[in-house]
Image (tube, rainbow, N blue to C red):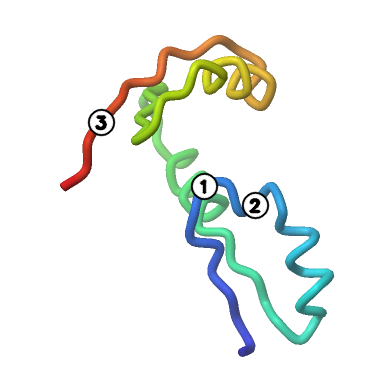
Amino acid sequence: MDTLILGCTHYPIIQGLVQQVLGDRVTLINPGEELAKILNLSDSEGNDEYFVTDLTPRYAEIAKRFLGKTIEPKLVKLG
């Protein structure tokens, strides 16, 4: 393997550890970084919405620690 795409929103949290385990021979790609670059090219103001498939009582609390703000996640069913 020469390239690994971090295909889930929480994988960048452990990106450093993954890179350490895999070594420099594997390139890690974080699609979120590239998406953020594209969205920053827009002149329009955006808004944040949070959708989850499992809403535990601690979810908003943990999200606040990561994001530094209170959020109101919306529960969705897939399939």
Task: State how many labels appear.
Answer: 3
User: Residue under circle 2?
Assistant: 12
Q: Kindly indicate the quadrant of the structure image that contains residue 64.
A: top right
Q: Residue at x 21, y 43 (%)?
A: 78
In front: label 3 or label 2: 3
Q: Nearer the viewer, residue 69 or 21?
A: 21
Please give the name of the residue rendered at 32% of the width and 21% of the height, measured from the top-left corner.
74
Locate residue 40, reporting x and y percent. Answer: 49, 39
Residue underneath mark 1: 9
Q: Residues within 10 Å of mark 3 (few under 14, many from 20)?
A: few
Q: Which residue is mark 3?
A: 76
Is 5 above or below relative to 73?
A: below
Question: Which residue occupies the foreground of this view, 59 or 63?
Answer: 59
Q: Residues within 10 Å of mark 1 (few under 14, many from 20)?
A: few
Image coords of residue 2 (percent x, y): 63, 88
Crowding near the residue tagged with mark 2, few <14, some 14–19, many ≥20 C-alpha atoms within 10 Å: some
Q: CA distance from mark 3 to mark 2?
A: 23 Å
- Occupied quadrant, residue 67: top right
Image quadrant where one finds the N terminus = bottom right
Residue 26, by quadrant, is: bottom right
Alpha carbon separation for disc pair 3 and 1 = 17 Å
Q: Nearer the viewer, residue 40 or 70?
A: 70
Label 1 sits on a secondary structure element that is loop
Q: Are marks 1 and 2 in contact (CB under 8 Å)?
A: yes
Q: Amino acid at mark 3?
A: Val
Q: Secondary structure at mark 2?
A: helix
User: For residue 50, which numbered disc appears in the image?
Assistant: none
Q: Position of residue 32 (x, y in %)?
A: 52, 50
What x and y, as percent, mark residue 51? 35, 30
Image point 81% across, 80% down: which residue? 24
